[in-house]
Image (cartoon, rainbow, N blue to C red):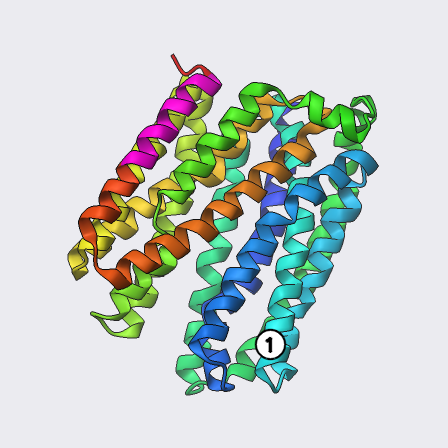
Amino acid sequence: MDKGDAYKAIALFGFVSLLGDVIYEGARGITPSYLGYLGASAFVIGLTFGLGEFISFGLRIFSGVIADKTRAYWALYAMGYLLVIAIPLLAIADSWWIVVLLILIERFAKSFRSPARDTLLSMISEEVGAGKTFGFHELMDQIGAVLGPATLGVILLWTSGDYKLAFTVLIIPYLGLLFAVLYTYSKIRPLVEPAIREARHIGFGEIARALPIEFKMYILAVTLNTIGLIHWSLILHQASLIEAVWMVSFLYVGIQLIDAVTAPVSGYLYDKIGRKILLAPFLLSIIPTALTMISGWSNLIVAGVFFGVVYGMQESIYRAAIADLVPVEARGSAYGLFNGFYGLGLLISGGVFGYMLVSGNIVLAISYSVVLQTLASIILLKSVKLF
């Protein structure tokens, strides 16, 4: 595979992710209010999205191992996108429990496609650099994450809140998604098939032994970093207590845009200066946490900016580092473990910082974040030998 083929492959994978994000990120912007419209309580709404995130990330531990064991990367990738049909089907859901079920089906599907996709991307990255590969892919992914919520928001504005029409419209990008997956498979499979065949076939026990100690320490560092970083949903929640909902919505779009810009830039820097760049998001994670706890509209805007920067780096260079730390035959498992513990970190972060926002203990929350990010940075320094 030459560099031209590699960039073409990254673009195709990115376009598939872009269409996927138009669908499910678009829906994520309005499904909480749709659940409330159908009579679901705030507890049900919170539990649904918390459980959805945990399913999406936690199950990747198992799906990554399955991907490595079966080498069925393409089948898992395709299955994960086929099940995105659950989102357009929200248009015919007439009770909140059906909506919850469809949301969880889509999150389940994401848990199976992501490690397979990241493994295929890591095979391509050997030609152009892991940082640029994952950075550019995340850029295209985030374009969809901006277009989706913006489009559905406009539809709801024009139709005075016609949820069913908004969800029905998503069948159009879904059909495009199916075509894009098939086209990507037909064009890219011949390029990555040699790498799949050459990867040594190993058993479950060997997969565990193939994961180096540096990778395991890296996972611990990332988990602590995630636990100590406030979640974007809490930034938006604090903003909703101060400003109109449409302004909060634009704050969310702003976070996605900053993520989209940061991902390729940090990916380029990763390939240029190496793993040193990994330390930046760990230290920057303290800023959005502190500013959200202090609150105030201007503070929350700045918190959103820094969260977007950190999130863009998490989605690009955190994944790129795994391609450098783990041999190809165990990368599906590695990406699965990475995402599983990342999901656990999100679950803990949401609970802890949500409780601290309710209790109003600003000093404790900021101190908690500083201690965790300092500890995470020390472990990171030891795990990937930054200097």
Label 1: few (<14), some (14–19) or many (≥20) C-alpha neighbours in 10 Å: many
Q: In which quarter of the image is the C terminus?
A: top left
Q: Which amino acid does label 1 sit on?
A: Val
The question of residue 382 being in magenta is answered with yes
Write down the residue under mark 1: 99
Q: Where is residue 117 in the image (x, y as percent from the top left)?
A: 66, 41
| Quadrant placement of the N terminus | top right
Residue numbers of the magenta segment: 371-384
What SS does tag 1 mark?
Answer: helix
Does 98 appear above or below 355? below
Estimate the x, y position of residue 374 in percent, counting from the top left: 31, 30
Quarter of the figure with residue 314: top left
> Does residue 148 lie above or below 69 as drawn?
below
Left or right, 166 with respect to 304, comes to right
| Location of residue 195 with respect to 182 vertically, above or below | above
Residue at (40% x, 18% y) in the render: 273
Q: Is residue 300 covered in magenta?
A: no
